[in-house]
Image (cartoon, rainbow, N blue to C red):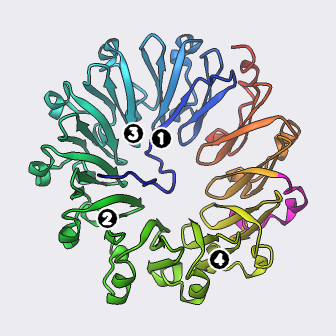
Amino acid sequence: MFTDKKNLRKRNSWLPNMTFVAADGHLKIACTSAAFAVVTAGGAVVTWGDPTAGGDSSAVEDELEDGVKAVFSTRKAFAAVKHDGRVLTWGHPAWGGDSSSVEEEFIAGIQKIYLTSSAFAAVLTSGRVVAWGDPRCGGDASAVKDQLRNGVKEVFASSVAFAALRHDGSVVTWGDPDGGGNSSAVQPLLQGGISGIYSLRKAFAAVTVDGRVITWGDPKAGGNSSAVKDQLASGVTAIYSLRKAFAAVTSSGGVVAWGNKDSCINNPALKEQLSSGVETVFASQRAFAALKQDGSVVTWGVADVGGDSSEVSSKLSRGVRDIVNTDMAFAALKSDDSVVTWGDSGWGGDSASVQEELASGVSQVFATQSAFAALKSNGCLITWGDAHSGGDSLSVREQLTDVSKVYCLRKAFAALKKDGSVVTWGDAKWGGDCSTVQENLRGGVQSISCTDMAFAAVRADDDVIAWGSPEWGGDNSKVRHRFNSV
């Protein structure tokens, strides 16, 4: 029996971004890379940010005044599903903002919408699939339309291609042929018996009911598993998508990895350590860490970015319960609530300056691209790593108490406190400076969303406050008056 275990450790930009109208009567936010879309309790939609990325919805503004049930987004376009089944799209036409070529198909009713970085695919209530957006990234499914007329159970996506799993266990693919859209080399193996599909940016891995793994897509990024095919012939129980590599865990708890060259497990001693007892696998840009059932950690990959943990091996021999990573370092949270780090010192791998604070009482660890933030059980927050990406919180340290949640961009943090106030730090252009809207963030904030370079906070009074790069959605001053009027 194939078990799906939290196979995607980090948010990837091509994964579905979706928001439903809140049952609790509060606003909800969806976002592209540079624009926000707020769905009000009444089902209206208000947008702002980069006009070419969905920030300008004026072309469909009248139809967005009410009745919206859900909103989905690619990197530069939104798609709103209304209660009457209609689908409205806006944003960059080449990224899914223009659905005119398939809008008549929506009359049949939408079951669910999926997306790559620049294309949408909708499963209709009949089980048929229609696609629109960038043809190179899955927006044109005409070549396989006969296979998508009915019987589609679910759709999976890489950043540039789709893979549809049918009720009969067969798989149909389309999109960039080099990124998983062409599965002809393994098509005979995809005619039935597939129970699950996993994706990387440019590759797919399908698992059969008996635990066999079949891969296709970019051979340098997980699409070619021929070197380990014998180890993937049966018994795989979980697959982890790790940037440019896959890692499969077998029924015995062993790990099999393939994809970029850094993922290879060639050392005999390493193979032995990874032959059993593995619970889950994590990855930085070029290194990997396997957390075993006994709480120990095994690492491999490029040594100085986390692949070599020998300096802290004694601290990783037992008691680890979770691992978080920046691009080039890891932080392990232990059962005694202490934190152990390794990897590139400039990217958070060296926590010596705050080691005393990390020795106990840590409940969660968060990360930007090159800095960590540890939330302690008493509500205090400890940071380290690259100062420009949030590793230095000295200027707001006295405010980092009673913190309940932490939100992260690539170069900035935002802490939501128990009293509903917000504290930010890191690169100002990436949302690390909220001084221009600070008065509106002193209380009442319930949740925070983000684009690539901006934050947006939803308040209890149904106001929304944005900050960060204006070009990426960090300024909503022109539409704030609409949140309480729609």
Name the amino acid, label 2: Ser
Q: Position of residue 286 (x, y in %)?
A: 45, 73
From mark 1 to mark 4, how far is it between C-alphas? 35 Å
Compared with 466, 423 (above or below) is below
- Residue numbers of the magenta segment: 388-402
Residue labelled with disc 3? 118
Give whichever of discs 4 and 2 has the lower sequence position: 2
- Labels 1, 2: front one: 2
Question: Left or right: where does residue 330 sit relative to residue 166?
Answer: right
The answer to the question of whether label 1 and label 3 lie on touching residues, with beta carbons closer than 8 A, is yes
Dot label at residue 75: 1
Give the mark, 3 or 2, whose residue is nearer the N terminus: 3
Q: Which tag, 1 or 3, sits closer to the chain's start?
A: 1
Nearest to viewer (mark 3 / mark 2): 2
Residue type at tag 4: Val
Mark 3 residue type: Ser
Disc 4 to disc 2, C-alpha distance: 29 Å
